[in-house]
Each structure stands twice: as C-alpha cells, then as structure tokens.
Amino acid sequence: MSQFEIVSREDFSEVTYLLEVRHPQMARAARPGQFVIVMLNEHGERIPLTIADFDRHRGTITLVIQAVGKTTKQMQQECRVGTSLFGLVGPMGIPTHIGKPKKVLCVGGGLGVAPVFPQARALKEAGAYVIGILGFRSKDLIFWEDKFRAACDELILCTNDGSAGMKGLITDGIAVALAGHADVDECVAIGPPVMMKACADATRARRIKTMVSVNPIMVDGTGMCGGCRVKVGDDVKFACVDGPDFDGHLVDFDDLMTRLRRFTPEEKRAEQRWSD
Ligand code: FES
C-alpha cells in the first residue's frame, strides 16, 4: 500500500471530480473547515484544497476538485484509483468553531458545496437545526444532494437555469429560508468570492453571524510567505494560519478577488505549456 493512495474517485461532471485519499493519521486529525496542501508530483505546484470529508474508519480524506488550471486539469487526467499523490500536507488552518447555534444556514455554491458538508454534519451533531442551501448552475452539476438531505433538517436546492430545485441564485434561496425562519442565528457560506460576498450582504441586515471560508493564493501554508493575505475589517490576516474561516461581514472581498487575479497570465501560460 503506497502513501497517499487514491482509493476511490468519482466524476461529478466534466470539470468536477472527487478523490478519496488514504491517510489514516490525517483522517483522525481532520476537523471541519480545515484544508490540505497537495503536490501531484515532485516538481508540481502546491495547491490548497479544503477537506470535503473525512472517514476515520476508512482512514481516508475526501477532496472535491474543479479542473480549472494546469495542475487541477493534470490531476483530473492522472489521478486514478491505485495511483498516489506525491505530497499531502495537513490538516491545516483553524478548524471551524461549531459552538451551539440553534438554527443555522449552511450555504454552498458550486464547488463550495463540498467543504460546507462537514460543517453541516458537525452542526447537526451539535444539536443545531440545519438548513442547507445549495446552488449550482444547472442540474447536471449537482452532487451530494443525498448527503445533504441526510445531514440537514431542510434543504433548499437552487439552480441558475431552473433545471432542478428552485430557479435562482443562492441568495434567492437564502431569502426563502429567512422568510420562513425568523430565528436563524448563524450562517456558513462557502463558494466563489462573489457568491460569499452576496451571501454576507444577504444576512447583514438581520445581523446574522456569517462565516465564510476564503481560498486565496497560498504557497507555504504556514504563515511565512504572506501570499494568502486577506483584509478582514481593519486587520490583515493570513488565511492559512488565521483562517480560512473569517467573518463574512468584515472580509474585503473586492481585495480578495483582485489578489486572486494576480497570476492569471502566468497561470494561462503554465496551462498552455502543459497542454502543448
Ligand atoms: Fe504563505 Fe499563508 S500561504 S503565509
């Protein structure tokens, strides 16, 4: 049995795939909200991925990945059951504080649906009434609906084109949930920055504590390089060691999005070189 062996794989769509990786120690240590840094091969870039699930009995962690750049596309091609990752470091980051909320919205958009799952499950286990709100562009991109139905007290499924669930954006789902529940005391939102920003705006008026999980560019993941700087209120935080969870009402999402675009030309060139 090799280290970091891929023991199962599932393809949710043409661009989204799941890898279940053997790492018993990490499976024991992992908590909701934490992430890992993956290296596909010896010379590969280090990519941060939020842990989407962990199974202490099987000794595995689960990653859900979107093939959007050179490395994630290469992983989509090369990571088959029985192959191994070169490196897998973690669990990193501060685990999500589960606390004792009475009623909580667990909001996941697109790929963010995966990392919100362990939080929904932990909140349910802590006694909260959990309302899951999942948003996808269309029906063929939906994954883990059954897992969420099992972990949540209610589930609101939204698609942009109306091909499944209610037609609309995830903020429309939040509006429905808030209209039906006056006593929501917390919201967890994970997805693209623009979506998390919209979710934070949707809960601001009601002053519902809203935690988001940011995913800036990371290099070392240990607080040394400063690459993952995020503005949170008047503070500058490092997502890798101070996060990745932050108060969504304080995160400067515009700055986050600008920083995420910093290396777009280099990323395009790397992908071009790899595909040639
Ligand atoms: Fe380098 Fe966070 S990734 S400081």
Image (cartoon, rainbow, N blue to C red):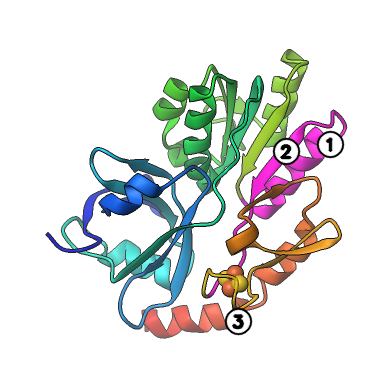
* Mark 2 crowd level (few <14, some 14–19, many ≥20, 10 Å Cα): many
Q: Which amino acid does label 1 sit on?
A: Arg
Against 144, residue 95 (above or below) is below
Kind of element beneath mark 1? helix
SS type, badge 3: helix
Q: Residue at x 64, y 69 (%)?
A: 228
Contact flag, marks 1 and 3 (Cβ < 8 Å): no
Looking at the picture, how far across and down is residue 254, in whole percent?
A: 79, 61
Distance CA(mark 1)–CA(mark 3): 35 Å
Q: Mark 1 points at which residue?
A: 204
The relative height of residue 190 versus residue 238 in the rendered view (above or below) is above
The magenta segment: 192-219
Q: Name the residue under label 3.
A: 265
Residue position for label 2: 210
Front: mark 2 or 3: 2
Q: What element carries label 2?
A: strand
Which is more N-terminal, label 2 or label 1? 1
Crowdedness near tag 1: few (<14), some (14–19) or many (≥20) residues, C-alpha within 10 Å: some
Most foreground residue, 274 or 193: 193
Disc with the residue nearer the chain's start (2 vs 3):
2
Q: Quadrant of residue 65?
A: bottom left
Residue beneath the point at 46% across and 68% down: 47
User: Which of marks 3 and 1 precedes in the sequence?
Assistant: 1
Badge 2 amino acid: Thr
Residue found at the far left of this picture: 1
